[in-house]
Image: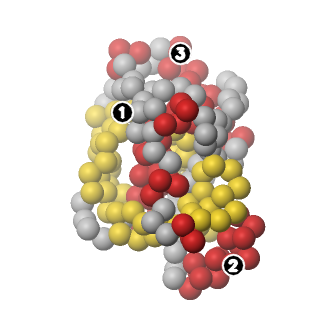
Amino acid sequence: MAVREVIRMGHPHLRVPAAPYPTEHLGSAEFNELVSDMRETLHAYSGIGLAAPQIDVGLRIVVIEIENTSTRYGEIEHTPFEVYINPTITSIADETAGYWEGCLSVPGMMGYVERPQHILVDYLTPGGVDKSIEAHGFLATVFQHEFDHLDGTLYVDRIKDLSLFSFEEEFVQFHADINAQDENSVDKTD
């Protein structure tokens, strides 16, 4: 296991769509090492989600883990560690909501992004099993944020109002109270 460097906005590989993970490699030593490194990196950077392209691996793999409900992101739903291989998202409802998002690949910045709040996630497990889950609210936002990385998209691409894009310190000083009044959470997803 190793902590890998998270590449940052401006690195051209963050903008390249990731290739599907070859299912014949599931369970291989290489696959297991990658997943272990992703988990170790996620913890080292204090994130809740990490996509393989963020560690400069152009494959469609995401890990998500929200260890407890009281985190630096506020009160959020516990989500045990899971690996999402070749995932897809289908929006189930038209309802959208906005959250202030941050990203390990865009350190020190926050931006307000609106996304669908009821989605279906289809993916392959490390054991090669097809699985589907529904996600609502903040967790739906986390999935969309992470899976965007697989398509070469960053949350900054989804900010509609650039006056709602700021450094973290200015977010706390000028926007956090507005955010709390709107009952929207801060999402420093990865």
On screen, residue 5 above or below 156: above
Q: Is residue 142 left or right of residue 73?
A: left
Q: Which corner quadrant holds the N terminus? A: top right
Amino acid on which disc 3 is placed? Glu
Amino acid on which disc 2 is placed? Phe
Cα distance, mark 1 to mark 3? 17 Å
Give me the disc on residue 86: 1
Q: Earlier in the sequence, mark 2 or mark 1?
A: 1
Amino acid on which disc 1 is placed? Asn
Asked whether disc 2 touches disc 3, contact meaning CB atoms under 8 Å apart, the reply is no
Which mark is nearer the camera, 2 or 3?
Answer: 2
**Residue 28 seen:** yes
Q: Is residue 126 left or right of residue 51?
A: left
User: How crowded is the residue under tag 3: few (<14 C-alpha within 10 Å), some, or many (20+)?
Assistant: few
Q: Is residue 173 left or right of residue 126?
A: right
The residue under the point 26% across, 51% down is 90
User: How crowded is the residue under tag 1: few (<14 C-alpha within 10 Å), some, or many (20+)?
Assistant: many
Q: Kindly state the secondary structure of the residue where label 1 is placed.
A: strand
Q: Which residue is mark 2?
A: 174
Asked whether disc 2 touches disc 1, contact meaning CB atoms under 8 Å apart, the reply is no
Cα distance, mark 2 to mark 3? 45 Å
- The number of numbered discs placed on residues in the rendered structure image is 3
Q: Kindly state the secondary structure of the residue where label 3 is placed.
A: helix
Q: Which residue is mark 3?
A: 30
The residue under the point 61% across, 43% down is 9
Cα distance, mark 2 to mark 1? 39 Å
